[in-house]
Amino acid sequence: MVEKLDQIFVLLSHWLVGFLPAGLQQAAGIVIGVVVIVCLYPALFALAVLMERKGLGRMQNRYGPNRVGPYGILQPIADGIKSLTKEDIVPLSADSAVHFLAPIVVVVASFMGFAVLPMGRNMVLVDMDAGLLFYFAMGASTELAVFMAGWSSRNKYSLLGAMRAVAQMISYEVPLLLSSVAVVMITGSLSLTKIVSAQNAYTGIFPHWYIFTPWGFAGFLMYAISTTAETNRSPFDLPEGESEIVAGYHTEYSGFKFALFFLGEYVAMFSISGLGTTLFLGGWSAPFSFLTWIPSWIWFFSKLMLSICVFIWLRGTLPRLRQDQLMNFAWKFVLPLSLINLLVAALWRFLGEGWQRWVFCSAILLIAYVFMGLQEARSDHFGPRSYRYAE
């Protein structure tokens, strides 16, 4: 019974495609998986938006949405109807074709990553040997879509916002990739299913998740920082600096096109949270050995939603950085620490079992963190602000 509950969606998919000829069953299974993903994550998007607005309301001592439906739970539906019925205004001088394609590319690129994410035991749409490489290849197209939006609008604010967004995303994509390379080095595979399987083991009741190793903990922190910047979330939401560049690269978007950018941002949050869960938090594996009877897909989505709650918490508590602080933090702190973490991962792999590698690897990371932190604290970039006035 427990096994059937764990594999309920796999069994349901096999039952549905069983009505078709054998030659069409594989293609039909992929189509069913795509339909489920395309329906599931927009529903989670609506739930996450409601959670965020309610959560931020509590953090800021206000109610949040409370008019549409009981306790405001129907607010996402009202927002969706408003976005669908709102007038779509395109600037007269804009490149209409590129202006139209940009939000579509953002959403499609965000959804493509789910094709290789294992959302439960045997629950992956396409099990690729180079799944991690495919994921990052698809995610890289987001930068192109953002620049398409800013350039096609023929608006200087939009173009500046797009350039800031692309610079930020490229800067933090480097440590994002490097933090993932450490996992590949330890696992010896680019397959996301094999990465989860490597962590699906226990010593006593405790799991072998990578986050519980020195290099895994440091890599997870670098990954979390980089993903926050990649998804333009606070405190790295510089592309939407209202006091400087209006709304950034989507200043000239309205109606459903603007809603697509909004959807793409949240779907990217789900996708990149799912990847972080897969790489460092054991994917669909249980946190304790005596909880393995709970369906694997429940663990995956529980970890994913916990990551979304952390995103919301950060937005409600941290102030926005300056642009120079943002870039300096990427190139002078996050990137060097990610490179050092690769060395530590290699040492961890070849030092063998024993407490010596725990002490040695932890000491290297701690010394590097303290040294670079003190260096940045002494620099002018993070010192007290001085204000000068025009005479």
Image (tube, rainbow, N blue to C red):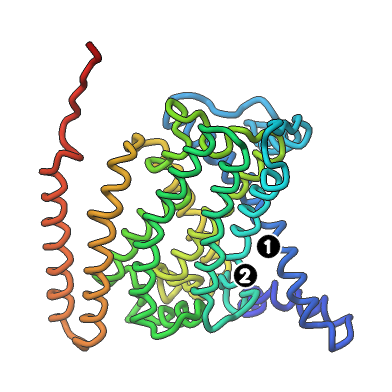
Q: Amino acid at mark 2?
A: Ala
Please name whichever residue, 354 or 112, is drawn nearer the observer in this view of the structure.
112
| Disc 1 crowd, CA 10 A, few/some/many (<14, 14-19, 20+) | some
Q: In which quarter of the view is residue 86 placed? A: top right
Count of labels shown?
A: 2
Q: Are marks 2 and 1 in contact (CB under 8 Å)?
A: yes
Q: Disc 2 on helix, strand or loop?
A: helix
Counting from the top left corner in percent of width and height, residue 8 is at 69, 73
Q: Amino acid at mark 1?
A: Ile
Q: CA distance from mark 2 to mark 1?
A: 9 Å
Quarter of the image with the N terminus in it: bottom right
The image quarter in which residue 333 lies = bottom left
> Residue 285: percent from the left, percent from the top?
47, 73
Report the front residue among 141 and 98.
98
Q: Position of residue 237 (x, y in %)?
A: 43, 40
Q: Is residue 69 visible?
A: no
Q: Is residue 19 above or below residue 173?
A: below
Residue at 67%, 78% (x, y): give it.
4
Q: Nearer the viewer, mark 2 or mark 1?
A: 2
Q: Of all residues shown, which one is farthest toward the top? A: 391
Q: Residue at x 31, y 65 (%)?
A: 219
* Location of residue 251 with respect to 131 vertically, above or below: above
Q: Mark 1: which secondary structure?
A: helix
**Of label 2 and label 1, which has the lower sequence position?**
1
Direction from residue 37 to residue 268 in the image, left or right: left
Counting from the top left corner in percent of width and height, residue 326 is at: 32, 44
Residue that carries the numbered disc 1 in the rendered image: 37
**Left or right: 105, with 14 as reference point:** left
Q: Classify mark 2: residues with Cα within 10 Å, few (<14), some (14-19) or many (20+).
A: many
Residue drawn at x 68%, y 57% is: 40
Location of mark 2 (residue): 115
Q: Nearer the viewer, residue 290 or 209?
A: 209
